[in-house]
Image: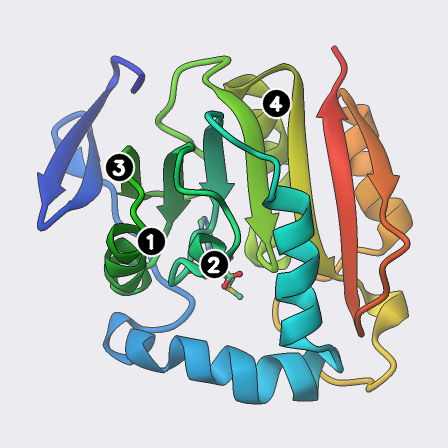
Amino acid sequence: MIKNTIQVMKTKHINYLREDGQKIKHKPWLGDLFSFLYDSIMTRSIFPKKFGASIKEHTRFLENECIDIHNRRVLELATGSGSITEVLPCDNTYRGIDISEGLLRIAYRKFLLQGFEDFELFVCDAEALPFEDDQFDLCICNLSLNFFNNLDRVVKELKRVIIPEGVFICSVPVPERNTKDSEIRGHLLSESELRTLFEQNGFSISSYDFVNGAILYFKGIKID
Ligand SMILES: C[S@@+](CC[C@H](N)C(=O)[O-])C[C@H]1O[C@@H](n2cnc3c(N)ncnc32)[C@H](O)[C@@H]1O
C-alpha cells in the first residue's frame, strides 16, 4: 500500500510519484539514454575490472539465496535493469524502486518475460519510500548501497517498511576487499561501518563467508 500523502501516476507501466501536486524528480546515475548499455557495462567492465569479481558467481550466490523464497512480499532497493529476475522466483509479489526510469523500463520487460504476475516498478529515491509501514517480508539490495547519499535515512526507511523479523539481503562493494585498488563509484563503507549503521538502526547483521572480489554479502534481520 502506498502512503496517502503520495500520489502515484502510472505511465507506460512505470509508476511516478507526486507530492503536493509536484512530480518528484531525480538525477539518475547513468543517463536514461545510456540505460541500454548498463548490462554490458556491468558484465564487461564493473565486475571484472572494478570489483575483481565474477558475475557468474554473484548470480549463482543470489540464486541459492532466493531459490526457496516463494509467495513473499519482496521489495528491492535499486532494481536497476532487473537482474533480480534471473534469481527470484516469479511467484513472489515484487515492488522495485530506482531513480532511473530508463533502467526500470528495461527491468519491466524482464519481469514480464520471467512470468512475474504481481510486480510494480517505481521511479523513486531509496531515501523516501512511498510505501506504508510493515509492508514487506523481505528486501533485497544489490550493488547499490554505495550510491545512496544518506544511507542512514535509507536504513531507517527500510526498517519502517519491512515487518518485524523481516529480512534484508545485500551485496555491496567494501574498500577492504578491493584488491584491484580500482576506483569504485559511490561512497564505500567498510564492513564494520555497515554493521554499526545497521545495528544502530535495529538490525542484527551476519556476513556470508562467500568471497567474490570487492563485494561483501550480508544479511540483516529487523529485530526491534
Ligand atoms: C550498480 S546499479 C545496481 C542495480 C541492480 N541492483 C543490479 O544489481 O544490477 C546501482 C543502481 O542504484 C540506483 N540508484 C542510485 N541512487 C539511488 C537512490 N538514491 N535511490 C534509488 N536508486 C538509486 C541506480 O539508478 C542504479 O540502478
Q: CA distance from mark 3 to mark 4?
A: 26 Å
Q: Quadrant of residue 73?
A: top left
Q: Position of residue 132 (x, y in %)?
A: 40, 15
Q: Is residue 149 visible?
A: no
Look at the numbered disc 3 and give the secondary structure of its residue.
Answer: loop
**In the rendered structure, which amino acid carries the disc numbered 1?**
Gln
Which residue is disc 1 drawn over? Answer: 114
**In the rendered structure, which amino acid carries the disc numbered 2?**
Glu
Which residue is disc 4 drawn over? Answer: 159
Which residue is disc 3 drawn over? Answer: 117
- The mark closer to the camera, 1 or 4, is 1
Residue at x-position 40% and y-position 34%: 91
Which residue is disc 2 drawn over? Answer: 86
Is ligand 1 less than 8 Å from the beta carbon at label 3?
no
Q: Quadrant of residue 100?
A: bottom left
Of residue 54 and residue 50, the one placed in the foreground of this image is 54
N-terminal of the two: label 2 or label 1? Answer: 2
Q: CA distance from mark 1 to mark 4?
A: 29 Å
Q: Quadrant of residue 210?
A: bottom right
Of residue 148 and residue 37, the one placed in the foreground of this image is 37
Q: Are marks 2 and 1 in contact (CB under 8 Å)?
A: yes
Q: CA distance from mark 1 to mark 3?
A: 9 Å
